[in-house]
Image (cartoon, grey):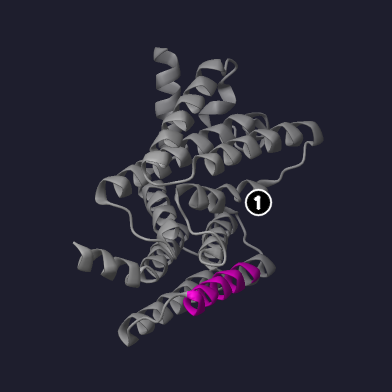
Amino acid sequence: MSKTLATLRTWRQQRFGHALFVPVSMTLVVASLVGSAWPSPLALAARGAAAWLAVLALRLWDDLEDRHRDALDHPERILTTVTETHSLVLIVALLLAVAGLLTVLGGGTGWVFLGLVGSAYIFYRLRARTRASGDFVVLLKYPLLVLALGGAWPPGSLAALALTLAAVGMDEVLQGPRPTRQSVIAGTAALVGSAGLMLMQSPKAPGGVLVLQTALIAGMAALSLQSLFGKPRRKLTRGGLLAMTFGTLLLCTTPQFAELIHAS
């Protein structure tokens, strides 16, 4: 067990930096609030913990499934040296079970969470047989997780789900050694289009909020496109995109947040 915990600790340092994945989790929580009523503070805390644990478990699960491919492409990753995975698989199952319970306690939808886990299992089994990559298919777990956490069903949260998927997709593009011009332009268009659609679907906001939302969308486009000119500062770009996505989603919950404050 001590060896497993040491492996898990090294994996977290390599593949699950808190500086990136805590904001990712909070962005998913905010996306689940767009078009929905704000839960109680206790339920909101449970939802945040559920998001973080689910993202942690799904990240570990994905790396376990990819360890043979990573042995060729990324031999420095700790899981490429692991031969016995039963204990790590058990940890993934435990994390998902706790995340599922917290999802329900946070006002989420348990059967959607179960559907997410089941879909991931089927996908990994099919990928193992076909040896297809499917890296971008894996990203669908994020909008599904938003729905599981309590996101409003379409059309209320359709644009929020699209923006979440566009943001994590763009992050995946920027992780590559050399983002192609086509992928950057397509990712930027998806970001701007989904964010603009979400603004049109959201209840009418005060003028100042609308100006700030527009500025954030313009900032997302500028940060994405700057990777086409010179050597991009990847950590700054990825962090900035995440912060602006979070801000855009949060501002779209302004009417619900105002109602919560008024009710209290």
Residue 192 among magenta residues: yes
- Judged left or right of residue 18, residue 83 is right
Residue shown at 57%/22% (left/top)? 81
Q: Secondary structure at mark 1?
A: helix
Label the magenta part by its dominant secondary structure: helix
- Answer above or below: position of 66 versus 156: above
Near mark 1 (Cα within 10 A), the count class, few <14, some 14-19 or many ≥20, is: few
Report the span colored magenta. 186-201
- Answer above or below: position of 65 versus 150: above
Name the one closer to the observer, 173 or 113.
113
Q: Position of residue 211 (x, y in %)?
A: 37, 84
The quarter holding residue 28 reads bottom left
- Judged left or right of residue 233, residue 43 is left
Name the one closer to the observer, 229 or 9.
9
Q: Position of residue 10 (x, y in %)?
A: 42, 29
Can the viewer see residue 151? yes
Name the one closer to the observer, 253 or 71.
253
**Which residue, as the protein is rendered here, is positioned at the far left?**
264
- Answer above or below: position of 233 versus 254: above
Residue shown at 65%/39% (left/top)? 119
The quarter holding residue 65 reads top right
**Which residue, as the protein is rendered here, is positioned at the far right?**
130
- Answer above or below: position of 211 versus 52: below
Residue picked out by circle 1: 136
The quarter holding residue 79 reads top right
Q: Position of residue 13 (x, y in %)?
A: 40, 36
Q: Amino acid at mark 1?
A: Phe
Query: Total marks drawn?
Result: 1
* Quarter of the picture holding the C terminus: bottom left
